[in-house]
Image: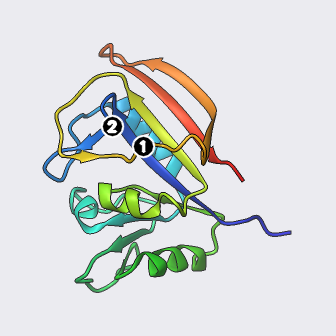
Amino acid sequence: MQQKFKLISVVAVAENNVIGKDGGLIWHIPEDLKHFKKVTMGHPMIMGRKTFESFPKPLPNRVHIVLSRYPKPNTEQVIWVTSLEEAVATAKSLDTEKAHVIGGGNIYRQTMDLIDEIEITRIHETYEGDTHFPAIDATQFERIKAKDLTTEKGIKLTFETYKKII
């Protein structure tokens, strides 16, 4: 029996739900980047154009499905699409059991009703920013896992997994 395809948001948020500023991340936390890599490796990632452009180059061993009104030519690692429906259909067509939504703020908001799980890194600090992650509706999602960590620099993190309540 084939497993159900899962759409999973992966995000790091500050105490005030800030996820970014001026089109990029505000923080550089190696422990969170390592977690992001572990979670997303080998699976397609759905993102907006600005998120894609924030990378110096495509991330290895992951197909990047990029939403844009003005798509560019596809490459082996980057597929441009013009709608969320096309992005999800493209991910499903890649013979994988899951895909990850990795931002930005508008993409997270648009996919909140579609996702099955949320992998969230809570950064227990407050940052100024202009992009926020939507509030997690406790009637739709339950926290099934949480692991606390203090980074080498003394920043407190919690890695949480939320699953959609069916």
Residue located at (39% from left, 58% from top): 109
Q: For residue 127, what is the image quadrant? A: top left
Q: Which mark is residue 17?
A: 2
Residue located at (28% from left, 76% from top): 68
Q: For residue 19, what is the image quadrant? A: top left
Crowd around label 1: few <14 · some 14–19 · many ≥20 (10 Å): few
For the residues labelled 1 and 2, say whether their Cβ atoms are less than 8 Å apart.
Answer: yes
Kindly report the distance in space between the C-alpha atoms of the residues bearing marks 1 and 2. Answer: 8 Å
Query: Can residue 138 be seen by looking at this rendering?
Result: yes
In the image, what residue type sits under mark 2?
Asn
First in residue order: circle 1 vs circle 2:
2
In the image, what residue type sits under mark 1?
Ala
- Residue 15 position, x and y percent, is 33, 28
- Residue 24 position, x and y percent, is 20, 49
- Residue 108 position, x and y percent, is 39, 57
Task: Report helix, strand or loop for mark 1.
Answer: loop
Residue reaching furthest to the top:
154
Q: Which mark is residue 33?
A: none
- Residue 42 position, x and y percent, is 54, 59
Task: Name above or below for residue 72 compared with residue 156.
Answer: below
Query: Is 130 in front, or is 155?
Result: 130
* Residue with the mark numbered 1: 135
Does 116 sit left or right of 77 as displayed?
A: right
Residue located at (59% from left, 75% from top): 92
